[in-house]
Each structure stands twice: as structure tokens, then as C-alpha cells.
Amino acid sequence: MKMKKITGITQWSVMTVLLMAAVLTSCTKEEPVALDNPGSTLKCADVPPSPSPMVTCDLIAGKHINVGTVAYSNDDNYMYVTYVTTDGWSLAELHLYVGTEDGLPRNRKGNPVIGHFPYAADDLPMGTTSYTFTVPLEDGMDCYAVAAHAVVYNVNGITETAWAKCEFKPIITLKSWIYNPDKDKNIWAVSDGDPISSDGWCRIMGTNVYEKDATYPLVSFYYNNPGMISVTDDGETLYVTVKVNDNLQLYRTYLYVGTKEGLAEYGICPDYPSFPYSIIDEYSNEHILKVPMPTGNGSTSFEEAFGAKRWGWFSQYCIQ
């Protein structure tokens, strides 16, 4: 009797089934990779120590409760994702996706399937308020879709589902000089907001957390209400407009946009002439400074991206 040959398609099907079985057997929630961190499961990865965060996002529970942060950073080999809860909230379990947007695990309705996210930490010890995942970077990939999910609880026994919501929220600090030929020295104005320092002249040099279409008053030792600062963006460029009253004239503006850690590199009372953005010797009652916005500066809801009914966000993180 002749034996039937297995066709190429059938061979491929058998191999596919065997490969899927091997993957499901070697890397599932039921058989996690053992780690030193008690109570954790990280599927197909490892967890070395994490450096300080670079990009910090809000951890939002119940759609509107801010329960902490999720911070993203990277070195040459790894991305580090750190969950931190505040105000009496703790972490119960975590699920994290890092990869391509198309690879985000979803069901037929488009809803994300967190049980299939490649990184997870289950049954965390009571009172856990911080946890870091370390994700190997892939060669040739500069930007990653990220979706960070958590189950959180508080001292009152309330349990909520939470997602990381990333927004473009750098701090903005600015110093402008106002030309006045009748004075023996130049007059300067600074932005309002939380002071950089409580010491020295820079105690009046303020910082503002960026909010689109926000306006802030300029303040000065020499003028009452000298003018305003307005900030907005078009999705690609941040526009910071400094405008003084008609009887005044700007001629220099120095601008910093970024993190508090980055601002600290310019000194306690910052060396503002070294700020990355400036307008020099341009005499006008208005200065407009343009700052390129980073890619991946915001979150997209699952509903908007996939037509999903489950609430939450995924974001894009690009290698720093």
C-alpha cells in the first residue's frame, strides 16, 4: 500500500500547530518565568535594576482618579517601565504591552486582551507601591506602542482598574529682557508659576507645567502687569509667545522646555543664556519661540484607535 504524501500546505499546518503548542507551553501565564521579585510573573523576559525615569505619565483609575504614575526610560539595551502609586493606593497586579501597534493583543471586537500582554506581575505583596519592568529593545525599532495596565486598591478596600495616560506635559520656564533706554540697566521679566528656587534672584523665576492654549502673566520688579505668555501647539511644534504691553519692547528671550531634572542641569539659579531656545537682539513687543514636539507625546484611547468598548489608553514611546 502506498502511503499518502503530506502536502506542503498540510506540512505547514502541522508545523504551525506544533510551534504554537511549543510557544503556549513554554511561555504562558500558567508557567511563568521564575524571578527574584516575589509574587511576580514576567513572561519571556528578565528584570534588572532600573535607572531614573525620563517620561512620566499619569496612572488613571476608574477613568478619572489619578492614583500615581507610570515612568518610561531606556538605555542602549532596555526600556524601563516603572509603576508608582500615591495617596494610599497600592498595586495588586500589572499587565504591560510593549511592541508594534498592530501587535497589541485584541479580541474580535477590538478590545485589548490584557491576559495576553507579554509582561505581567500577579499577586503582588500587600502594600506594593512601586514596580519596574525591564523590556529588551529590538534592533531597528525606534518607537514602541506601550499600554500599561494595573489593578489598584486603597485603604478603604476600593479596587479599580487603571491605565497609564501619557500627555505632553513638560515644564516651561522663560526669561525675557525689556529694552528701556532711560535706565542704566536693562529691565527683565519672568514667567509666573512655581519658583525654581527659594534662594537668590531666581526665586521669582517661575515654571509652568504645559497646558495647551494656556496663558500666564509676566512678572517684573519694575513694571506692573508687563504682559503675558501664551503656549499652544499644532501637534508637531510648541509655540511659546511672549507679548508685552504696547509701551514696552522686548529684545531678548531665553526659553527652556523639558523636565525638572533637565532644568537642574543649568544650575540652581539657571544659566538662562544657555537655554536651548532664544531670541537675541530682536526688538519687538512680541517674541514667538518654536519648539519641536517629541513624537509619541500623547495617548490614544482604545475606543478611538480600535473602536473598542473597553476604556484605557495606549501610547507611543520613542527611544531617547
Image: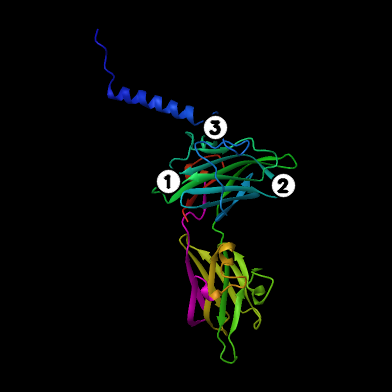
How far apart, in angstroms, are the residues tagged by discs 2 and 1?
36 Å
Identify the image quadrant of residue 246: bottom right
* Pair 3/2: label in front: 3
How far apart, in angstroms, are the residues tagged by discs 1 and 3?
22 Å
Q: Residue at x 54, y 32 (%)?
A: 32
Look at the numbered discs 3 and 2 and tell me whether their residues touch, using CB distance below 8 Å: no
Q: What range is drawn magenta here? A: 273-301
- Measured as percent of width and height from the top left, residue 120 is found at 56, 38
Vertical placement of residue 226 versus 89, above or below: below
SS for tag 3? loop
SS for tag 2? loop
Which of 175/44 is in front?
44
How far apart, in angstroms, are the residues tagged by discs 3 and 2?
29 Å
Q: Callout 1, which amino acid?
A: Glu
Q: What residue is shown with label 3?
A: 32
Q: Residue at x 43, y 42 (%)?
A: 102
Q: What residue is shown with label 1?
A: 138
Q: Is residue 160 left or right of residue 7?
A: right
Magenta stretch contains residue 296: yes
Q: What residue is shown with label 2?
A: 88
SS for tag 1? loop
Q: Residue at x 60, y 77 (%)?
A: 227
Vertical placement of residue 205 versus 68, above or below: below
Q: Give the mark, 1 or 3, whose residue is nearer the N terminus.
A: 3
Q: Callout 3, which amino acid?
A: Pro
Residue 188 visible within the image: yes
Q: Which mark is residue 202?
A: none
Identify the image quadrant of residue 229: bottom right
